[in-house]
Amino acid sequence: MADGARGREGSVAELTLRGVLLGGVITLLFTAANVYLGLKVGLTFATSIPAAVISMAILRGFKDSTIWENNIVQTVASAAGTLAAIIFVLPGLVMIGWWQGFPYWTTAAITGTGGILGVLFSVPLRRALVVDTPLPYPEGKAAAEVLRVGSGSREGAAESAKGLSVLVWNALASAGFAILTQTRLVAGEAAVWFRAGSGATGISGGLSFALLGVGHLVGLSVGMAMFLGLVVGWWVLLPILTAMHPMPGGAEAWAYSVFSANVRFFGAGVIGVAAVWTLLKIAGPVIGGIRSAMAASKARHSGEALALEEQDLPISIVFAGSLAMLVPIAILLWSLVSGGPLAGSEMILIAGALIFVVVIGLLIAAVCGYMAGLIGASNSPVSGIGILSVVAASLMLVGLFGRDQDAHTTAALVAYALIVTGIVFGVATVSNDNLQDLKTGQLVGATPWKQQVALVFGVVFGSLVIPPVLDLLNTAFGFAGAPGAGPNALPAPQAALISALAKGVLGGDLNWAMIGWGALAGVGFVVLDEVLGLMGRLRLPPLGVGIGIYLPMVAILPVVAGSVLGWLYDRWCAGRADPEFAQRMGVLTATGMIVGESLWGVTFAGIVAASGSDSPLVLVGEGFEGSALMGGIVLFVALLWMLYRRTQKLVLTD
């Protein structure tokens, strides 16, 4: 039985109106912040942990609040970081000139239908990917530790008091450093770029406590796999490809240009093969999970009592709900197709899209759930899955219509591919998040079906707030590359890439060579991982390798460093009187780092939106970069040493 379930008897607060409404308010705030940051820098932040912290602070004032009600709040609010990822697709419709703004109900329907399908598709995956699995689920475990500490501290438990102390101090240090980076008094990134022969490459790492904490939680195996991908992408491929594509200007701009145009496609090919291999490996457990879900449903109907941790949404509701969701999707697609250049082809287009959403959506739900378990929801390369999805959707349309179409019809097909991808993207992002939440629930003894219902509420809340935020930002700034975009246009990098892919496939000029070479390399990484497993050596998950190639080095390097630091800390724990307690304190150390930077991310997004400035907190001008870099590195390392040393001292004190 999960630790949080011990002593749980009778009726206790869990899925309450109070919790759902509080989660909804947090969802609205975090979604708006995530949409802005995602369009600005191409990254979103996970909201489960900061939501859990806020929830505990508010619900502590109610005597009947419980750890399970707090868990419901963070489950609802986690939809914020999740659904905001739709910005990686939908702005492409404005960029290609198909939309001039974001029609409210159409945008909400695309987001909401895909999100609810993501919840339903991931229900039968829980047993295979959450219960019967060695996957680390770093953010799920971190959120569970936050909830336990908050619950235990109210009861005055000595261990919880130590844990809360670690969590709070690490969060303050993490947030404080992040604030300093926004003032530019210290640098947020340490990088050096240089020529390598006739090519270019570099070394770049973010001074991010959050990313370092994620590395601690994912473990050495995943960290080393990501490091292998980093080596292949940045220090092998990039020097070769930059030498083949010489460009004027500095090494940094040159390297990033070639990385975006070529290396990322190579990484997408690796991720594609690794995703297929992952599906083959988990096919048996997934089928077993579905059978188990059906057996549980049969037992429920026969009147047999099920343990709390076995109570998923009934599989009959999952099947019926999934079929029911296809109706509004079909109506939505019909409204978009009829009367335009594709009129007369409604039936074949809608039938093909529905089959695509179901088949690809189910596959992606499994792969994204696995990736969330492997490296966490916020670091999972969902945009890489979006790349594969839009390529597949575009190929489907090529198969149905061919490429010999006039410009207006081709533009309509590109828009249709983006809309279908948007629905599938909702499936991907929510399944990526849902299983992480269910891991948290398993660890604290929550009821699975109540969490699944709570996430549906979160999807609805998020879907209602995303359209006006997108429309506001489009009106105020516009998107780079869109018709009439101004000088302050938001880059929206993933949306630009995904829309370019759709045009490339339907126009016949996609960079298939790099995707193909990446797929071939992916086969090699799969073989390497299996051989290492047979030899009993440290394994290198191929998805981790693909992620290391696909994501920028600035995000990968601190995760790798954190995985090594976490491994060293766990070795230290092995010699302690209570190694399990020492390891839990290490988890809280890493969790505090994530909490502080995440909460500051929300606050800073609000400051940016209110001020209208990209850098409202800057205190120094140009010429201070050298001092900021040295000061940032020294302060970051010093704080890191102090935080881990403080944790060790708390472990050793009685």
Image (cartoon, rainbow, N blue to C red):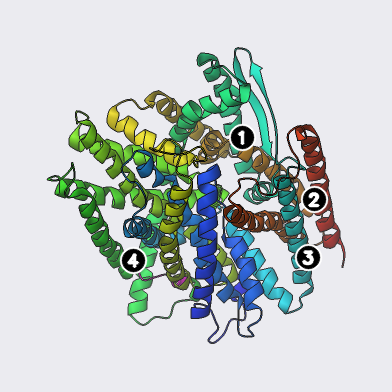
Q: Is residue 399 above or below residue 353?
A: above
Mark 2 / mark 3, whichever is N-terminal: 3
Distance between mark 3 and mark 4 Cα atoms: 42 Å
Mark 3 / mark 4, whichever is N-terminal: 3
Tell which residue pokes out farthest to the top in this image: 198
How far across and down, in percent of the image, does residue 383 sit? 46, 43
How far across and down, in percent of the image, does residue 144 sit? 62, 65
The residue at 56%/64% (across/down) is: 440
Q: Which residue is mark 2?
A: 572
Residue type of the residue flagged with mark 1: Met
Distance between mark 4 and mark 1 Cα atoms: 40 Å
Q: Which residues are magenta?
A: 310-315
Q: Which residue is mark 4?
A: 318
Q: Where does the C terminus fall, quadrant-wise?
A: bottom right
Which secondary structure lies at badge 3? helix
Which secondary structure lies at badge 1? helix
Q: Which residue is mark 1?
A: 553
Mark 1 / mark 2, whichever is N-terminal: 1
Quarter where residue 615 is shown = top right
Tell which residue pokes out farthest to the left in this image: 344
The residue at 23%/31% (across/down) is: 407
Q: Are marks 2 and 3 in contact (CB under 8 Å)?
A: no
Which secondary structure lies at badge 4? helix
How far across and down, in percent of the image, does residue 221 sit? 62, 42
**Residue 317 visible within the image:** yes
Mark 4 / mark 1, whichever is N-terminal: 4
Indicate which disc residue 165 carries.
3
Mark 2 / mark 4, whichever is N-terminal: 4
Which secondary structure lies at badge 2? helix
Residue type of the residue flagged with mark 4: Val
Distance between mark 2 and mark 3 Cα atoms: 21 Å
Q: Please state if 301 lies on the left or on the right of 587 as rendered.
A: left
